[in-house]
Amino acid sequence: MAPGGHTARSHAPATPDGAVDVVRPEPAPTGRIRAHYESWKPVYWAFALSRLLVFVVGFAADAAMRITGQDPATWRPFAFAETYPHYADVVTNGYTLQNAYDYPVLPGLMAAGDVVGIPLWLTAFVLANACFLVGLLGLAMLGERYVGKLASVRGATYLAIAPFAYWFSIASTESLLLALAVGSVLLALRATPGAWLGAGTLAALAALTRPPGALVGLLLLCIAISQLRARKLGVRGTFAALAAGMMIPAAIAAFFAFLKGETGDALAAIHAQDQFNRHVTLDGPIKALESGVRNTLAASPGQAIELVATIGAAALIVWFAARAAGDRWELRGWTLFGAASLLLPLATGVLWQMPRFALLIPPVFWMLGMLGTERRWLHRAVLVLFPLALAIKVATSVVGVAG
């Protein structure tokens, strides 16, 4: 009742037939969370089941080596597998001319955890897995724009169970970079000044995670061009986008200046690669492919896998450029990002862990998802073969490596 005893009038707008159009309230936060989960449930399940496989196999292999009393020099605990010693060295000893190839975001976060009493390995382990979930969801959401929801969900599923996807669960930077890259792009697509500044911040952090992170700038540039052409950016938005782009080189310059103070060499991150005989040259990609073909013909299974992964990833990037739908500048951005992400490691002149590098090229998995959507037999084969290969890769990350 209104004051004075009269019936209160509804302020809701009336429809043409005179009925009151009831304005529905915004869904509660719990409702939005539930709706989000229902919409992307397959991605959550892909994450959960793939990580369960990784954890069970990894820690089971770890336990088997302990129980059987194997020589500690011939294996490494799963929580300390692969690149953990490198990042722990940065935290423990600071930057030197030998370890400067490790970019600062992950060791910085590990050091922050250590300050409050969290073991270095546990901080890295939790971060890697949490960021992988975020990155996997972001990859699926972005992929819906270009290949449709079903293909994007299947692409995310394939990434979760990919043979080299155990890198997303150990002390390495793959998960961090994936989450930062897709998060930066999702923010930039909102086309608001605040979102662009957020996108630039995430892109700057990506550039400080590992060298390919700087390539996120290619994506942001193409998105900004698209939004400018569509007049989605006002004056403030344009300046915010420019500021976002400048954050990336500024972050790298700050890191190099820090290395100058710590090691005396501003380019220590580049020069530290010399100990692995990795030198970037313009003809490096040609040399890498030539060596890969020679070694494959000489019956090198490892090089054959590297070569197939390289050629396959390149083909899927080209197919993405030709087949994916959506804003052309966005598609160009992803194509440039994918090509540059592939060429950067190839520029060292060798095929080295190319399946691992391909994990961070979303168009590759979006197009794999499209293939799986169009060919049911391929989808079923991937769901069987990928987890088997993943289990083998997890086990070998523990067994047969220096402790």
Image (cartoon, grey):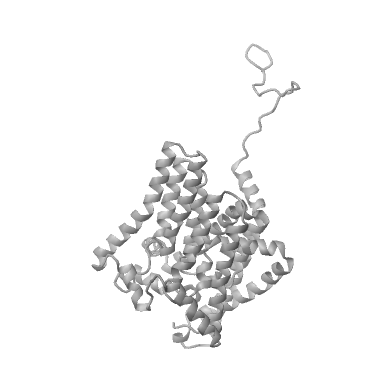
In this rendering, does residue 394 appear at all?
Answer: no
* Quadrant in which the C terminus is drawn: bottom left
Residue found at the far top of this picture:
4
Residue 56 occupies which quadrant of the picture? bottom right
Q: Which of 248 and 111 is in front in this view?
A: 248
* Quadrant in which the N terminus is drawn: top right
- Name which residue lies at 40% across and 55% down: 204
In this rendering, does residue 284 appear at all?
Answer: yes
139 is higher (above) or lower (below) than 305? above
81 is higher (above) or lower (below) than 220? below
Residue 134 occupies which quadrant of the picture? bottom right
Across and down, in percent, residue 203 comes to 43, 54
- Taking the image as shown, residue 53 lies to the left or right of residue 279, namely right
Across and down, in percent, residue 165 comes to 55, 69
- Taking the image as shown, residue 384 lies to the left or right of residue 212, namely right
Q: Which of 173 and 236 is in front in this view?
A: 236
Across and down, in percent, residue 285 comes to 46, 72
- Name which residue lies at 57% across and 75% down: 308
Residue 234 occupies which quadrant of the picture? top left
- Name which residue lies at 48% across and 73% down: 79
Q: Which of 393 and 211 is in front in this view?
A: 211
Across and down, in percent, residue 314 comes to 55, 67
303 is higher (above) or lower (below) than 250? below
